[in-house]
Amino acid sequence: MKEAKYFLKVFLGTLGLFLVTVLLLFLFFNRNNPSSVGSKEIVIQVIVPDEEVQEFTLSTDALTLRQALDEENLIRGRESSYGFYIVEVNKRRADEDKNEWWSITKGGEYIEYGVNEINIQDKDQYELTLMEGY
């Protein structure tokens, strides 16, 4: 009799853990993840020294910043061993002879990733700033 009660407790405990695991897996794989899919609106500021700041509001389903910028034809660049290198933003080309390059910031904070690796979320704001000197 004692063994039957013990077996029943172990069986019900195992069954309960199994059902909780199945429920959690179901919820995990069927969750709504707005940071990876869906309509997003982001703001892009193009900052060139001694020129007026240009601001673009993009509505996109893109996952990365590069995809969103490519959809609007805002950037041009080339692939390098370090990733995609932006050479032109909104038809303003960085002059390599003057050591000009494009910096990407989010809300004024430098981003340590390339434009390919920056995942965007709704209401994000990015700045593309033309810098001079390395």
Image (tube, grey):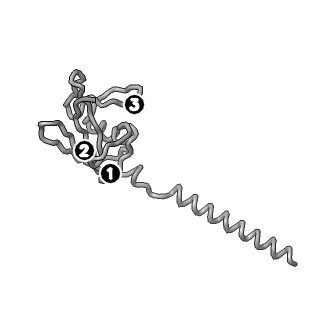
Query: Which of 37 and 82 lies nearest the eye of the viewer?
Result: 82
Residue type at the position of mark 3: Gly
Mark 2 vs mark 1, CA separation in Å: 13 Å
User: Which is nearer the N-term, disc 3 or disc 1?
Assistant: 1
Identify the element where label 2 is drawn: strand
State the image coordinates of residue 122 (x, y, percent, origin top left).
33, 53
User: Which is nearer the N-term, disc 2 or disc 3?
Assistant: 2
At horizontal 41% and vertical 49% (from top left) the residue drawn is: 36
Tag 2–tag 1 contact (CB < 8 Å): no
Residue type at the position of mark 2: Ile
Q: What residue does disc 3 label?
A: 83
State the image coordinates of residue 114 (x, y, percent, origin top left).
37, 36
Q: Which mark is residue 40?
A: 1
Instruction: Please state if 1 lies on the left or on the right of 31 as rendered.
Output: right
At horizontal 35% and vertical 47% (from top left) the residue drawn is: 120
Tag 2–tag 3 contact (CB < 8 Å): no
Q: Is residue 129 above or below residue 93?
A: below
Mark 2 vs mark 3, CA separation in Å: 21 Å
At horizontal 70% and vertical 67% (from top left) the residue drawn is: 15
Identify the element where label 3 is drawn: strand
In the current view of this chain or complex, which residue is farthest to the top? 97
Q: Which mark is residue 108?
A: none
Quarter of the image for the N terminus: give it.
bottom right
At horizontal 28% and vertical 45% (from top left) the residue drawn is: 126
State the image coordinates of residue 110 (x, y, percent, origin top left).
31, 43
Identify the element where label 1 is drawn: strand
At label 1, counting other C-alpha atoms closer than 10 Å, the crowd grade (few under 14, some 14-19, many 20 or more) is: many
Q: What residue does disc 2 label?
A: 44
At label 3, counting other C-alpha atoms closer than 10 Å, the crowd grade (few under 14, some 14-19, many 20 or more) is: few
Quarter of the image for the C terminus: give it.
top left
